[in-house]
Structures are given as structure tokens and as C-alpha cells.
Amino acid sequence: MQPEIAVSSGSSCLVYPLPSILDRIDVAKLFPVNQPIEVELGSGDSSFLVEYARRCPERNFIGVERLLGRIRKLDRKGRAAGLANLRGVRIESSYFLEYLLPQRSAAALHVYFPDPWPKRKHLRNRFVNERFPTLAAQALLPSGTVYLRTDDQNYFEQMVAVFAGSPMFCPVETPDSLCGLLTDFERDFLAQGIATLRAAYRVAG
Ligand SMILES: C[S@@+](CC[C@H](N)C(=O)[O-])C[C@H]1O[C@@H](n2cnc3c(N)ncnc32)[C@H](O)[C@@H]1O
């Protein structure tokens, strides 16, 4: 158990307290209904995921976020919206993707405005790096999709390059319905007149 992430009392808390960090989660235990799962890695204030979950009751959604205050927001907003198809997990995204999310379990992975780490000496900290396509392919169902957004041109080029170098994925269009759903950071960037970039990749058949 991780008592520090029991962010509210009562059975309706949407934050999933990981029973172990050594075993993959049993996704069937997270949600009342067994249906396709989508995961946002670095879900921030969860405004994207709460709205997406509200619009898509036929899917389950997991937000992964390392900051307690932000995972609390997911809980608060998700419960206010009465969502049964949303859960938050407070943990580091790379670890979750590699070790906790069951293999071939997710219909989609969403990575929106990950920290850009612009300094050369910090580039290795970027989440979408050379290993990412392999980890994503392991986590995704056949024909599952990775959706990416960033405001950072250099990071975008890195994202495109790592997927271009992976035979496991092919580029696809982001559906209009998803493009229209903005994240918290995206709203801020657009309000400041900063352009944002997006790309999507489907597991190759
Ligand atoms: C720039 S914000 C973007 C948030 C959200 N996706 C959006 O577009 O509004 C990046 C988020 O990822 C979280 N984050 C950064 N690195 C992380 C990591 N390694 N594991 C989990 N969360 C992380 C941060 O705490 C922050 O909430």
C-alpha cells in the first residue's frame, strides 16, 4: 500500500493505491466495467482526461501523474463529474509504462506536453526517447495508437525521428474529435499565441 496517495476517504476515491510496485496492475480491478483502456502519461491537472472520459463512457481512462496536487485534481474533478471510467495513478510515467501497465492492454497512450528538457545536458531525461516506441508497442493492443503533442519544435522532431526509426509503428492522423479536446497546457500556449504540434502513430499490423 502507498498510504500517502490515499487522497480522500471513502470508496469513491478515483486514485488507485497501487497494491505493489513490483507487479503489473490488474486493470479489471480498477473499473466497474471491463472495456478498452486509454492512458495519459503525465496527466497534469487532468482537464483533458476528465472531459475525454465524460465524452467516452464506453472506454476506461487512467491518468498517470507524479505530483500529488495534480492527482488530487483528477480525483476531485472526476468525482464531481460522476465518472466511473476514470482512475489516477500517482507514479513515475516511465516506470508505469515499463513495469506496471500490463502488456498488450491499452487501446491508446496519450503524451501531451511532456517536460521538454531543452538544455543539451538534460536531453536524456526526455520521456519520448529512443526506447519509447518499444515500451509503447509492448503496452498497446494490436492496432493501438500513441498520441503526442508538444509546443517544443526540437522535442517534436525527436518524437517524429524515434517513431520514424521504429518498424513497430506507422504514422496516422489524429482524429478531429481528439484534436478538439485541449489540455490545460495547450490552452495556455494557444492563449499566448504559441503554436502546438501533434503526431500520432499506430502499431503496425
Ligand atoms: C507540462 S505538464 C503537461 C500536463 C498535461 N499533459 C497538459 O498537457 O496539460 C507535464 C506533466 O507531466 C508530469 N510529469 C513530468 N514528468 C513526469 C514523470 N516522469 N512521471 C509522471 N508525471 C510526470 C508533470 O508533473 C506535469 O503534470
Image: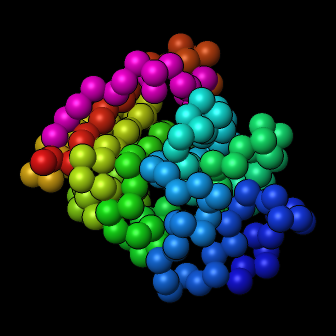
User: Does residue 138 appear to the left or right of 24 in the view shown?
Assistant: left
Corner quadrant of residue 198? top left
Residue 86 position within the rendered picture, expressed as x and y whole percent measured from the top left: 64, 49
Residue 4 position within the rendered picture, expressed as x and y whole percent measured from the top left: 79, 74
At x 48%, y 40%, the residue is 112
- Specify whether residue 142 is painted magenta: no
Residue 85 position within the rendered picture, expressed as x and y whole percent measured from the top left: 63, 48
Give the residues drawn in magenta, as a range: 170-187
Q: Is residue 65 visible?
A: no
Corner quadrant of residue 9? bottom right
Q: Quadrant of the N terminus?
A: bottom right
At x 53%, y 57%, the residue is 34
At x 83%, y 65%, the residue is 11
Above or below, 98 against 151 in this view is below
At x 46%, y 21%, the residue is 177
171 or 175, nearer to the observer: 175
